[in-house]
Amino acid sequence: MKINDTNGTALLLNGQVDIASQYCPLMLPTYKSAEKLKCIAFTDTFLGMAIMAKPELKLKSFRDYIKEGKDFDSAIKAALAPLAGKTLVTPPQLSDRPFTDAAAAFSGVKWKMQVLEDSKSLVLAKSGQIDFLNPEGAPVVYTLMQAGWTRVLGIGDLFEFAPGGAGSPVAPLVAIVGIGANADYVNKNPNTVLRFLSVVWRTIDAVQKDGTLYDLQAPYLNSVAGTSLDGAGVKATVDTLHPFAPFEYGKTYFEDQNNVLYYGNAWGAMIKEFVKNKIIPDNGLTPDDIIWAAAIWKQMADYRQKSEKLLADLGKAKLADDKKALYEQAKSYYDKFNYLDAFRLATAASS
């Protein structure tokens, strides 16, 4: 079954799919009538939102102006000034719209919009029929960058240079891709969810250690995005535009309250935006009502800490053969990020 931004939320909501990769803000509008969908993990910080300009225009980017010594306000106004009155091609998905709206608000520049699917806009861009493009997918952004297009402004520019913290105007723009799930399934299968997420973290660890694994993903990605990337190109796209978040990065997402990526800051602002625009009712929804990822990550981090202590103690002890087998299996689970079963078997080995 193919899951995408168009059908993923509906499939999760009606229970046809229990768990799926998901840009979790797409689930928030469902809270107008239901509260079934939860974000159970954050997997990567998406930096692929960008306004691109074709090479022939020879434009400077926001970062070029920053390097020249301009402050944030001056740099963003100068970078986006060439778009005044022009047409910006954007995707039909709503996930990119807050970024382009913020770019317009920060710069004071007004442009026209043309909605087009990435696969079609990429063809037109390659043939020189588009001047300015805001793709939905990072592979398209990377492909255009390789073709010499200017990344006039990227979401990462706002993360780095715009004011941070809980009241930051950038907080509603934070785009963290994760894992969506139906709450009924999560509540009925809590241990299965933890084991599933251990595979997610193990996969992230594996591709960060061995970039050739992206060769496996390239054919499917190209068939969906209309790109022609090889494994190295996919790796470069991920590393540049949406770097995967290893297990340890949960400290940034779920503990560092001064970081613009902290889930409470980002989702608190996002919920306010949705309420203000009457997309969802003002019924006291909080980040923790939809982001179960924080509690789940902290639970797994607790299992990891307890497992480490047990394994350290067991490593110094003289164990019977049956206990030693449990100890070795617990170590194997620990190395695979399955801290739940590492703790479970280490406990059994120490009893």
Image (cartoon, helix red, strand yellow):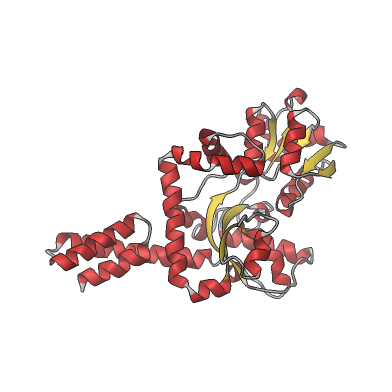
Q: Nearer the viewer, residue 350 or 58?
A: 350
Residue pictured at 65% horizontal, 44% vertical: 224
The residue at the point 25 percent across, 65 percent down is 310
**Residue in the picture at 57% in, 40% down:** 219
In this rendered view, identify the residue nearer to me: 289 or 341.
Answer: 341
Residue 195 to residue 52: above or below = below
| Residue 242: percent from left, percent from top | 57, 45
Left or right of 339? Residue 50 is right
Can you tell which quarter of the image residue 54 is in?
top right
Instruction: Identify which residue, 258 or 200, lies in the foreground.
Output: 200
| Residue 208 in which image quadrant | top left
Rendering coords of residue 128 (x, y %): 78, 27
Q: How many marks?
A: 0
For residue 320, side relative to residue 163 (left or right): left
Q: What is the x, y in percent for residue 71?
A: 68, 37
The residue that appears at 38% across and 57% down in the rendered structure is 337
The quadrant in which the C terminus is found is: bottom left
Image: 254 above or below 109:
below
The answer to whether residue 179 is above or below residue 51 is below
